[in-house]
Structures are given as structure tokens and as C-alpha cells.
Image: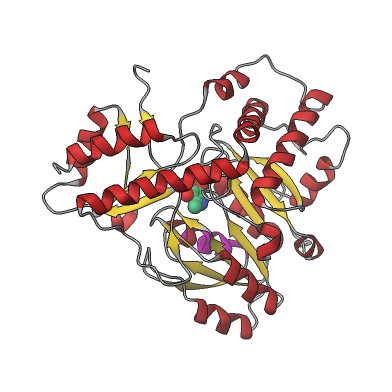
């Protein structure tokens, strides 16, 4: 373990040995049966984690590529309403502005989304809604079922970033009325960084834009995905696909329900520790919002700086995250994604407690 820091940041997360081994194999033909079978099997597991029977394809690119694929294919030249209460909600709005016309409904980071404003925008003709399910920058879980219901009521498409919820928290794409959902490989799936999976509803396929990007053309992914063996349109990041396939096998072995329950327990342990230390959790909740089960954001208490706190924890070989943008120096975040278990949590909490001098 020497020289291998324990990453307790909100992704990337430590990669199990089996998954690492899978990506160091000799090259295989990406248009052959072995690749096709691995791709199809990965898709099968991911659909369970997304809670969907929809088609799902994997893009060689990080989570942001998946967000952009959703917007560029399904929101082009449309009226988009973007719900923002953190960095990634803001990113979705910025991506939207490149392709359509965006009304950003901004709440302070870590505070509830403006659902009344959303209803008004939908009444006024918004055609697409973007929302981040688990807003990693602020440690808040946003109300996907409520947003899905509103979007459906007004026949708008709902594009959801599930980058840090899918695989670590309960996600029900079909039940909630999500039309496009995205996950990133380096988060709760505990695979290497560099892949994004995108699931698309029938309603969204029916509305796919005529004017699509080239590399992120979801119609091209769909066409290649339906070939036998299953393929991607361009050469994929084969080693990453093989690693993600192995990560999905590990998820199946653990069991999806058990895995999500473990994520809940680990995040609850961090929240309990914060309470014990007298450290405030960052999000401000209402009845519709919840604390994240994959990234806990806490205020840095008086008497310690961000640098001291994270520097001391790092001396124990553990990395936790600070705040992003205007939250730098104000909050710290502990990720509980992927394979994190009691041992990792206990050593992390002990190190943080030591650093806080509690
Ligand atoms: N969305 C959320 C909620 C995230 O937490 C992140 C990364 O932290 C992203 C999107 C962006 O993903 P990537 O860095 O893989 O492009």
C-alpha cells in the first residue's frame, strides 16, 4: 500500500486489483465477439443500476462528455431550464448555453432547488430540464422524482446527471420519468476514469435533434450498439471498457441492493462523526432534498484551516477533498463511493478527528 494514497475524495476512487488487472491485458479487436460480449454484459449491469429498461451506450470520455452528449443530441435549439445548486448544475447550464437557450434557476450552492420556478418555466414553454441528482460540490441530493413528475406533466424532456449517484444510491430512471441519465466510470462504479454511460428513453429518441455533434452522436452509438457483435462507432478506450466490465462483475457479486445499502451506511457514519465533532453539515435541506449518500460536505470549523486539515489527513496517507470555486477554504468533503467499507471510513474519520483536534 506504500505510495498508494487512500482516495476518499468524491471520485476518482480506489480501483480494486481485479479491475486494474483487466485493463493491462493485451489489446483485443474492438469489432470482435469478445469486446462485443463485454460491452453487452456491462450494459446489462448498468441498466440495473440506472433502474431502466431503456437503451444504454458507453462513451469514451468522462462524465462531462456524457452530460454534453445528452444536451447536444436532445436539447439542441430548444428552451432549456437548468436547475442549479452547485458546480455541476452550473456546468449543465453552461453546456446547455452552447446548444440551446437556457434559463438557469440558481439557488445558493447546497440549498434546495427552485421547484416553483421550474413549474413556472415549464408553464411558459420550457422543453428540456437539466438537473444534477447528486450535487457533489455541495453534498446535496436533489429531488429527481419530483422534477421528473413536473417535466412529464408539461411534456418536457428530463436530462439528469447521475454521475455520482448511479451505482451508489437508489436511482430509478424509468419510474422517475428521466429521459437521459448519465454516469461516470470513476465514481460509484469504482472503475478507472474515462468512460461515461448514457441511457436514453424512447421519448428522447423520438425527439433526437437532426443537427447532432459528430463524435458524441447518440444515433451513431445506437446504430453500432445494435450491431452483432455490439460495437461503438469509433475506436473505444478498450482497456477502460474491460476494466468497467470487471467492475460491473464485482458489483453483481456484491449485489446491487447490498452495495447501495453499504454506501448509505458509510455516508451515515460520516454524518454521525460530524455531529460528534460539532461540525456543521453544509447543505440546507427541505422536505424534498436530502444529504448525499456518496459525498458528505461539511463546514470547516473555526481554529483550523483547509490546508492544515487536509494536510494533516494526508500525512496518514488519506486524501479528502476541499471546496470548489467560492467554497474553497470553507468546506471539506469526504467521498464514500465505490468500494469504501468500514476500514476506510474508520481510518479516515480517525485522521480527520485528529486533524480537527477533537
Ligand atoms: N457531475 C457530477 C455530479 C460530478 O461530481 C462530476 C465530477 O466530479 C461531473 C459531473 C464531471 O465528471 P467528469 O469530471 O468525469 O467529467
On screen, residue 31 above or below 325 = above
Quick check: 184 left or right of 306? right
What residue span does the magenta drawing correspond to?
Answer: 90-99
For the point 38% across and 40% down, the residue is 9
Counting from the top left corner in percent of width and height, residue 127 is at 67, 74
Quadrant containing the N terminus in the rendered view: top left
Q: Quadrant of residue 158?
A: bottom right
Counting from the top left corner in percent of width and height, residue 162 is at 57, 53
Q: In which quarter of the image is residue 42?
A: top right
How many labels sit on residues? 0
For the point 39% across and 68% down, the residue is 285
Q: In which quarter of the image is residue 110?
A: bottom left
On screen, residue 80 above or below 41 = below
For the point 51% across and 81% down, the residue is 116
Counting from the top left corner in percent of width and height, residue 267 is at 40, 47
On screen, residue 243 above or below 142 = above
Nearer to me, 33 or 220: 33
Nearer to me, 299 or 215: 299
Q: Can residue 215 be seen in this view?
A: no
Residue 96 located within the stretch drawn in magenta = yes
Residue 105 located within the stretch drawn in magenta = no
List the single residue furthest toward the right.
228
Counting from the top left corner in percent of width and height, residue 23 is at 61, 22
Q: Can residue 297 be seen in this view?
A: yes
Amino acid at each position: 500500500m506504500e505510495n498508494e494514497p487512500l482516495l476518499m475524495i468524491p471520485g476518482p476512487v480506489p480501483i480494486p486489483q481485479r479491475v486494474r488487472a483487466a485493463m493491462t491485458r493485451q489489446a483485443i479487436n474492438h469489432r470482435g465477439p469478445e469486446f462485443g460480449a463485454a460491452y453487452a454484459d456491462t450494459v446489462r449491469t448498468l441498466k440495473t443500476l440506472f433502474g431502466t429498461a431503456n437503451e444504454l451506450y458507453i462513451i469514451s470520455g468522462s462524465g462531462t462528455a456524457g452530460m454534453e452528449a445528452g444536451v447536444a443530441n436532445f436539447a439542441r435549439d430548444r428552451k432549456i431550464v437548468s436547475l442549479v445548486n452547485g458546480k455541476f448544475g452550473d456546468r449543465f447550464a453552461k453546456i446547455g448555453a452552447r446548444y440551446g437557450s437556457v434559463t438557469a434557476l440558481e439557488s445558493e450552492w447546497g440549498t434546495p432547488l427552485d421547484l416553483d420556478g421550474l413549474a413556472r418555466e415549464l408553464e411558459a414553454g420550457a422543453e428540456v430540464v437539466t438537473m444534477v441528482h447528486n450535487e457533489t460540490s455541495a453534498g446535496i441530493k436533489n429531488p429527481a422524482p419530483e422534477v421528473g413528475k413536473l417535466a412529464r406533466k408539461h411534456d418536457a424532456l428530463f436530462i439528469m446527471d447521475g454521475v455520482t449517484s448511479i451505482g451508489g444510491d437508489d436511482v430509478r430512471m424509468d419510474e422517475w420519468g428521466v429521459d437521459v441519465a448519465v454516469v461516470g466510470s470513476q465514481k460509484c462504479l469504482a472503475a478507472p476514469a474515462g468512460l461515461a454511460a448514457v441511457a436514453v428513453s424512447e421519448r428522447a429518441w423520438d425527439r433526437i435533434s437532426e443537427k447532432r455533434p459528430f463524435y458524441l452522436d447518440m444515433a451513431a452509438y445506437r446504430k453500432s450498439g445494435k450491431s452483432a457483435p455490439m460495437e461503438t462507432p469509433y475506436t473505444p478506450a478498450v482497456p477502460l471498457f474491460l476494466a468497467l466490465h470487471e467492475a460491473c462483475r464485482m458489483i453483481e457479486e456484491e449485489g446491487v441492493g447490498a452495495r447501495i445499502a453499504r454506501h448509505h451506511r458509510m455516508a451515515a457514519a460520516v454524518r454521525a462523526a460530524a455531529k460528534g465533532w460539532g461540525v456543521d453539515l453544509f447543505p440546507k435541506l427541505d422536505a424534498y432534498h436530502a444529504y448525499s449518500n456518496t459525498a458528505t460536505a461539511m463546514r470547516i470549523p473555526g481554529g483550523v484551516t483547509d490546508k492544515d486539515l487536509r494536510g494533516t489527513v494526508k500525512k496518514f496517507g488519506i486524501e479528502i477533498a476541499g471546496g470548489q470555486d467560492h467554497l474553497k477554504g470553507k468546506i471539506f468533503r469526504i467521498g464514500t463511493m465505490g468500494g469504501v467499507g468500514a476500514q476506510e471510513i474508520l481510518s479516515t474519520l480517525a485522521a480527520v478527528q485528529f486533524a480537527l483536534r477533537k
